[in-house]
Image: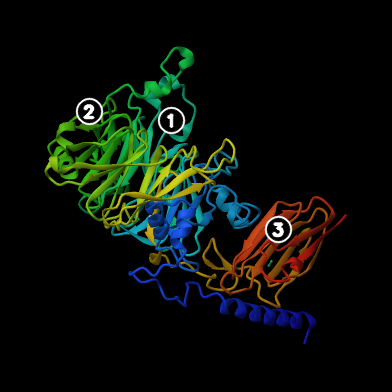
Amino acid sequence: MKPALKRTLMIGLLALLLAGLIAGCNRGRRDETPEPVSAEGDLPANALQIAAERGLTPDDINAALKTFMPSGQWDEYLMFASGGHSGNMMVIGIPSMRILKHIAVFTPEAWQGYGFGARDIEEMLDAGNVNGVKIRMGDTHHPALSETEGDYDGQYVFINDKASARVAVIDLRDFETKQIVKDPNIISNHGSTFVTPNTEYVVQGAQYATPLGWEYAPIEEYEEKYRGLITLWKFNRETGRIVPEESFSIEAPPYWQDLCDAGKLVSDGWAFCNSFNTEMATGGIEDGNPPIEAGASQRDMDYLHIFNWQRAEAAVKAGKAEMINGMAVLRMPVAVEEGVLYLAPEPKSPHGADVTPDGKYIVVSGKLDPHVTIYAFDKIEQAIAGGNWELDPFGVPVLNYDAVKHAQIELGLGPLHSIFDDQGFGYTSLFLDSAVAKWKVGDEDPESWQMVEKLPVQYNIGHLTAAEGDTVSPDGKYVVVLNKWSVDRFAPVGPLLPQNIQLVDISDGNFKVIYDMAMGIGEPHNAQIIKTDKINAWTAYPEVGWDPIKQEKSEYATLPGEERIERNGNTVEIFMTSVRSHFTPERVRVKKGDHVIWHITNIETAHDATHGFQLGGHNISLSLEPGETVTFELDVSNDGTYAYYCTEFCSALHLEMMGYLLVEP
Ligand code: CUK
Ligand code: CUA
C-alpha cells in the first residue's frame, strides 16, 4: 500500500471514530424528558425564594416561564430579521429570542468565510458591484420568505439592499446567500422585498428618485427627468435564482415609493406601494428652499401606488416594454394605457402598506396622521372600472379618495406598520407614541373597524411582526416589536446602543411584553416569523465535494487519496482535503510570483463537523461545512513562510490542524 493512501485511510478511520463519538452524544432535541411539573404546583421549594430575592413580579415570573427554553429544546418559531446597515440578516428563535444565525448577505463576514477569498462568493458579491465600484456593504430592510398560495413554504428568503438597490436570494436548505442582483435603473430601493403569493416575483419598489440608470441630470429638471420605479424580479423556484432576463420594471412618477405589499386571494395579481414626497421636494436649503423634510411634508395627501403585475407581465410579453440598461421597462404612458398603474390619495407622508390576511383590505399608515386608513379592494376595483379618477401631472389616474377609502381608525401618534393575528386583530406600530395599537379588523361596515387597546414599548418602535402574520393564515401567539431606541434598557456599552427587540405575548387575549432582547449587531427593520417545522435545512451537504453556490457536486471535489499539487507554468493548483484533524497536503511549496488556485474539500459528513481555513497575511478566511468544496485564488507576491490553519475548534488536535505555505524567493 502506498504511504499516502495508507495515511489517508488511517485519517479516515480516525474521523469516522470521532464522528461516531460526536453523533452518539448529540441527538439534537432533548430525548429523555424528565418528569414535568404538574399543574397542582410541585415547584421546587426555593422557586419563590429565588423570585423574591431577585425582586421578580408575578408578571416577570410569567414572562420567564413563557420564554425559557430548556437545554436542548428547539424554539417553535424562527424569525428572519433584517440586519439594517450591517448589510446582513439574523435568524432568531422564538420565544427564547436566542440568535441562532447571522446570515452574511451584502457584507463580508469572516466566520462564514463570506467575502474573504472564496471564489464563487466573490463572484456573487461582484455581481452586485455598481459601475465597477466594489460594493461590500449594504442596508437590508425587508426580508421576505418564499410563499406558496400566500403561505410561507420555508424554501427561500429574499432581502433588499436599500443603499444600492440590490436584492439577494438565500436558500433555506443551507441558509446561505446564493445570488445578488442589481437593478440597472435605480440606485436605492425600499419597498423591497415582498413576494407575490406563489413567489412568481420578488417585488421591489424604488425610493429616492433619480433619472433612470441614475445618470446625471440637473436637479432643477427633477419633474422632467427623475423617475420612480417598481421592479418585479422573476423567481425560478427550481433553479432557486432570480432570472433578470424575465424580470421587468414599471416606470412611476418621481414620488418616493416606500413600502409595498402584494395582494392575495381576492386581490392576487395586484400589489400596493405607498409613497411620500409627492411634493417632489429636492431640498436646497442652501438656495433658500425649505429643507427636504419640510418640503416633503407640505401636502395633506400622498399617493398609494396600485399596480397589476399580471397585466404588466402580459404587456411585457406582448412586446410593449422598452429595454433600458438591459432591463425591460414599461414606460408610464404604456403602464397607464394597459391598466397597470393607478394611484389613490393617502394621508400624510405614509410609511406602511399592509394587506389583510383575506386580501380584501389594504391598511396604510400616515406617519404624520394619527389614523390608519383602510382601503377596500372591491372599492378600488369599482373605481377603476367606473373611471372614477383624475390624472396626476404625469398622466397617471388618481382614484377618487372617498370612493376607495373604506374606514379610518384613530390609533395614536406616528403609525408606521401593521401586522395581523389569527383572532381578527391588527397591530400597528406607533413610533411617536412608543406603543403598539391593537385594533379590530372589521368588515364591510366601516364602523366595525375599531381601536381596542395600546401597549407601551421601549422605545420608538419601527416595524412589528407576528407569527406568520403577513400570510393568508396568521398564527397569533406572538408579536415581535423592533424598537429603534433602547436608551436605558440595558447596561451601558458606550454611545452606540443596541436596538431593543421585544417579544409580546398575544396568546389567549394577553397583550404583554415578555422579553427584551438587545440587538447589538445591526438595526433590524422588518422581520418575518415562520414555524420552525416548515424549514428543512440540511445537516451536511448532500455529497462530499459539494459546491454550495451551484448546489451540485463541484468539479473540484477532492476525495481522500486524490490530494495533489499541479504546476502549469506559473500557475499552481492545489487539491486539498480537510478532516479532523488534518489538511492534506500539509506543505505547499510555491515560488514568489506564482498564481495559486487552491481547492479544499471538507470530506466530513458528520453533523456539525465544520472546519475553517485562514491563511495569515493573505486575507483568506473560509468556512468548510461538512461536504463542502471551496476554491480561492492567490497571486503570491511576497516570499516567506506562512501558516494556514483550521479556525473551528474541531477536535482535541484542532491546534495541530495546520500546514505551511512556503513561498520561495
Ligand atoms: S422601514 Cu425601517 S421602520 Cu425600511 Cu420598513 Cu419602517
Ligand atoms: Cu478543523 Cu479545527
Q: Residues within 10 Å of mark 1 (few under 14, many from 20)?
A: many
Q: Which numbered tag is attached to residue 211?
A: 1
Identify the residue at the far bottom of this view.
1
Q: Residues within 10 Å of mark 3 (few under 14, many from 20)?
A: many
In the rendered structure, the answer to whether residue 447 lies left or right of residue 525 reads left
- Of circles 3 and 1, which is in front? 3
Q: Residues within 10 Å of mark 2 (few under 14, many from 20)?
A: few
Looking at the rendered structure, the kind of residue marked 1 is Pro
Tell me the CA gap for discs 2 and 1: 22 Å
**Mark earlier in primary sequence (3, 1):** 1
Confirm or reject: label 1 Cβ below 8 Å from ligand 1: no
Q: Secondary structure at mark 3?
A: strand
Q: Secondary structure at mark 1?
A: loop
- Position of residue 587 relative to residue 185, above or below, is below
Q: Quadrant of the C terminus?
A: bottom right
State how the image is colored: rainbow
- Viewer can see residue 140: no
Disc 2: which residue: 391
Looking at the rendered structure, the kind of residue marked 2 is Leu
Disc 3: which residue: 614
x and y, in percent, of residue 442 in the image: 17, 46
Between 375 and 407, the one nearer to me in the picture? 407
- Position of residue 591 relative to residue 489, above or below, is below
Between 269 and 55, the one nearer to me in the picture? 55
**Mark earlier in primary sequence (3, 2):** 2
Tell me the CA gap for discs 3 and 2: 61 Å
